[in-house]
Amino acid sequence: MKSLSKFIVTVSYMGLFPFASGTFASIATVIIWILFIKLNLIIYFAYLTLFLFIISFYFIDTYLSGNEDQDPKEVVIDEFVGQSIPLLLVPSSDELVIIFLIFIFFRFFDIFKIYPINLLEKIKGSKGVMFDDILAGIYTAIAVLFINSYIL
């Protein structure tokens, strides 16, 4: 079960990339999003995100059991789910400028852990791993919706 957990939480071993694995997972999420848009299958992207969100808690906890580091960099399923939130929530997220802004803002909020994201990160286990990225995704959606409404 540990090897299946590793496969899932690293999103097909993408998290094992030697540097910036979270950024690469976010880029992969955006690319997958664009493919789903081009194929007019956005609802299936939403289902995929929901499915990964639901199973992530079990598989992250399984992967973390016996691990000193409670938020290892190779766990990137949280980036996939967090990056997906603004892609799904921002109405014009099929436009390249908006997609770029979503990517940049999500990485900003995920890396710098703006309050209260920093508090969520301290929660032990899968909840801490997932909830900080979920809030980063929500912050991103709010920021991009604001920019799209008042600036662009």
Image: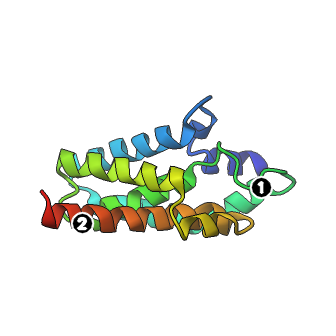
Q: Is residue 49 left or right of residue 125?
A: left
Which residue is label 1 attached to? 64
Q: Position of residue 37 (x, y in %)?
A: 23, 51
Q: Within 10 Å of the Cα at label 1, are there few (<14), some (14-19), or many (20+) other Cα atoms? A: some
How far across and down, in percent of the image, does residue 24 sit?
48, 37
- Looking at the rendered structure, the kind of residue marked 2 is Leu
- Residue 44 showing in the rendered view: no
Residue ranking furthest to the top: 18
Q: Is residue 120 visible?
A: yes
Which residue type does callout 1 highlight? Leu
Residue, x 19% and y 53% (percent of image)?
94
Q: Quadrant of the C terminus?
A: bottom left
In this view, the mark in front (2 or 1): 2
**Residue 35: image location, x then y, percent:** 28, 44
Q: Is residue 127 positioned above or below 96 on the image?
A: below
Residue 71 is situated, as x and y percent measured from the top left of the image, at: 70, 53
Residue at the location (20% across, 45% down)?
Answer: 96
Please tell me which residue lies in front, 152 or 124: 152
Q: Earlier in the sequence, mark 2 or mark 1?
A: 1
Q: Mark 2, residues whose alpha carbon is within 10 Å: few (<14), some, or many (≥20)? A: many
- SS at circle 1: helix
Q: Which circle marks residue 145 in the picture? A: 2
* Extreme residue toward the right, this view: 66
Residue pictured at 70% horizontal, 69% vertical? 123
Instruction: Classify residue 84 as left or right of residue 135.
Output: left
Determine which quarter of the picture holds residue 146.
bottom left
Measure how far apart labels 2 and 1 are at the Cα level: 35 Å
Between residue 51 and residue 70, name the one nearer to us: 70
